[in-house]
Amino acid sequence: MKIVSCVLMSGLGIEIHETAFVTSTFRSLNAELSRDVYARLWSNSRTDELVKKYLNNVCEEEVSAHCLRNRFFLEEIERLKPAVVINFGSGFSMYPFLLDKSIINIEIDKEEIISYKEERVNEFQKNGELPDRIIHFIGVDFSKDYVGVLLEKIKRIKKNKTSFVLIEGVLFFLSRKDTDKLFDFFSMLQRKGDYIGSASFQKDLKKSKGFKKLLDFCNKEMVKTEASYWQTIEDDFYRTNKNYELLNHQDYFSLSEKYNNEVKLEKDLILNENFYILKKIV
């Protein structure tokens, strides 16, 4: 069951996933930590109101959590220097404009999100608010058999270049079957020595006070849901993948230590996300 809510943003005329706006707002609230100086471009009053409610009722450290996630993957991509960055479930992330201009960026998401993002990016660039970058926008209907067509589209762009696949803020909302299908797809797409950056939560999260607050908030403000709808993924999923080697594993607490972010709440109140870097070995 899909639990990410959609709203009709006033004046847009199309449905956009609210979480894409929320995540951008989180990143914009501490641009020094996230290093995302462009996230502010997606700001709007409705999302600002929802974010304020979320931080007050769920977890005030979600700003730092999303900023650290962005910072970690941004700096890993900079360190690994792939020729192509392929962002699955790209939402309104701004990596193409934060990375070197030589990188080829492939942004993939639902058709309505990609259409809106491409339109707005073109407007921002025309107005001089964003620099020019090499970006290919690909909208996908994930309810259909997308593998063959999408694989061909990406391979025509990627060719034999090195790549980094990024999937963040997505796996929580997928089934394990769909997750396995995605990682098999990544393996077909990538060559030996390419990388994946992945973000996911572990099962202990569902026992925490923070997760209970998240469920209560979603049921009140967004859409009815329950714990079983949300996917958690243990380390073994990454460690035992026959096509990839796990190189790096961080979480909110380790990244807070690395980037001198003060953890203010007790651990049980924090939605602790885990971050992984994988390298293709076959």
Image (tube, grey):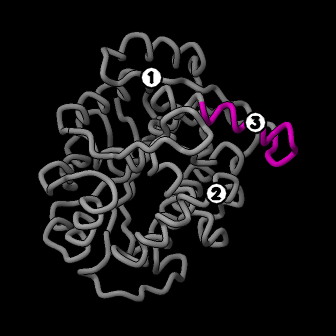
Circle 2 sits in a helix, a strand or a loop, which is it? loop
Looking at marks 2 and 3 on the same chain, the residue that comes earlier in the sequence is marked by 2
- Check disc 1: other Cα within 10 Å, few if <14, some if 14-19, many if 20+: many
Looking at marks 2 and 1 on the same chain, the residue that comes earlier in the sequence is marked by 2
Gap in angstroms between the C-alphas marked 3 and 1: 22 Å
At 50% from the left edge and 57% from the top edge, which residue is drawn?
A: 23
Quarter of the C terminus within the rendering? top left
Q: Does 139 appear above or below 94?
A: above
Gap in angstroms between the C-alphas marked 2 and 3: 22 Å
**Going by the image, does 212 lie left or right of 263?**
left
- Please provide percent x and percent y for residue 152: 47, 11
Looking at the image, which is closer to me, 227 or 161? 227
- Please provide percent x and percent y for residue 246: 33, 50
Image mark for residue 155 = none
Gap in angstroms between the C-alphas marked 2 and 1: 25 Å
Magenta extent? 116-131
Q: Main secondary structure of the magenta part?
A: helix
Image mark for residue 43 = 2
The amino acid marked with disc number 2 is Ser
Mark 1 lies on residue:
140
Image mark for residue 133 = 3
